[in-house]
Image: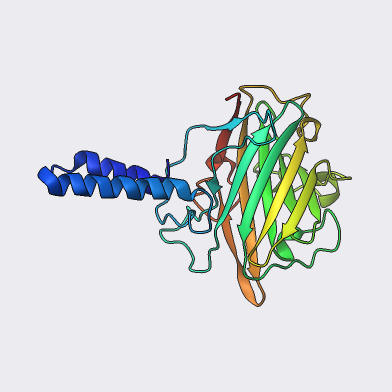
Amino acid sequence: MNRGAAKAATAVRRNPVAGSTGIYLCCALSLAAALLFAAGCRKNAPFNRGHPMKPSIIKIPRNHSGAESSECLPLLQHWQPEPDPALQPASVRLSWTEQTLLIHAELYDDEIFSAVSGDNQATWRLGDVFEIFLKPENQAGFFEMHVTPNKYRLHLHLPGPYCKPSPEADPLPWEELTVTPCGFRSKVTCLPDRWLVDVEIPADALQLEKFCENDQLQANFCRYDYSKNKPPVLSSVAPLQAADFHRTNDWCTIRLADF
C-alpha cells in the first residue's frame, strides 16, 4: 500500500468519532486511500513528501509471462528533510527469470541530455544517467551499471566503495574497473517529458551461474538529473543517509521470489 494511504487508514482506525460524521469521514478517507493506491507510478506518486522506512527485504517476482513486476519503487532524497524543489519523479520496477534480472525505470525530466559519446565513459559527469548498483551475496565487490538517454552504457566491477579494495587502499585504476564490452543490455525511449529505460542483466554479468528463488542481493537504483548550467539533482531508491550512492550499508536488500 502507498505510504499515504496507509497513514490515512491508520488515522481512521484510531479516530474515535462516532455516528454519521464518523462514518462519513471513514468513507471519505477510505476513498482517498484507494485513489492513492491506484495512482501507482503516475507522475505525482513519488512525491509522497515523507521518507519511508527502509524495508527489511524487497521481494522481486519471477517473470513467468512477461507481465509480472515488483511494486513501483520511487527514487527519493532520503538524506535531507525536504526534497529539492527541482526533484523530478522517477521510479523502478523489477522482475527476474532464471537467466536475467529485468529492470524498468521511468524518469521524468524537463531537459533530457547527455554529452557521453561512447560506452564506459564517466557518465555521471556528462549529463543525465540512470544507475544500478548490485552486490550478490557472498561476493566482496559489487557491480555498477549506468544507462544514458542517448543509449550509452557504463559497466563497472568494483572491489568496494570508492573503487577501493579496502578503506585504507588507493582506488584501482579505471581500466581495472570497467567491464569491456558491457555485459548487460538496455533499451532507451525518450518522450517529451520523460525517458524510459529497460535493462536486462544476465546472471553471468554478476558472476553468477543463474538466478534462483530466494537469492538475495544488496541493491540501489539512482539517477543524476542534469539541467544545463545547474548542479545535478540526485535521488535513489535506497534510504541513503547522505547523497553518496556508494554507501553500501544503506542499500536495500532484494530477494528473488516466485509469486
Q: Is residue 160 above or below residue 78?
A: above
Q: Is residue 250 left or right of residue 201?
A: left
Front residue of 213/17: it is 17
Give the residue displayed 59% in from the left and 32% down from the top.
60
Colour theme? rainbow
Q: Residue at x 56, y 41 (%)?
A: 251
Q: Quadrant of the C terminus?
A: top right
Q: Position of residue 59 (x, y in %)?
A: 55, 31
User: 212 above or below 135?
Assistant: above
| Residue positioned 42% across, 61% down in the render | 82
- Asked if one can make out residue 246 in the rendered structure from this viewpoint, the answer is no
Depth check: give the residue in front, 195 or 84. Answer: 195
Outermost residue on the top side: it is: 213
Q: In the figure, is residue 108 to the left or right of 184?
A: left
- In the rendered image, residue 197, in percent from the top left (x then y), is placed at 71, 51
Residue at the left extreme? 19
Query: Quick one: which residue is furthest to the bottom in this view?
Result: 229
Q: On the rendered image, what quadrant is the N terminus found in?
A: top left
Query: Where residue 140 sits: x, y (%)?
Result: 69, 32
Q: From the viewer's perspective, is residue 245 above or below residue 96? A: below
Q: Is residue 202 above or below residue 188?
A: above
Residue 194, position as x, y percentages in the image: 64, 62
Residue 145 seen: yes
Q: Quadrant of residue 71?
A: top right
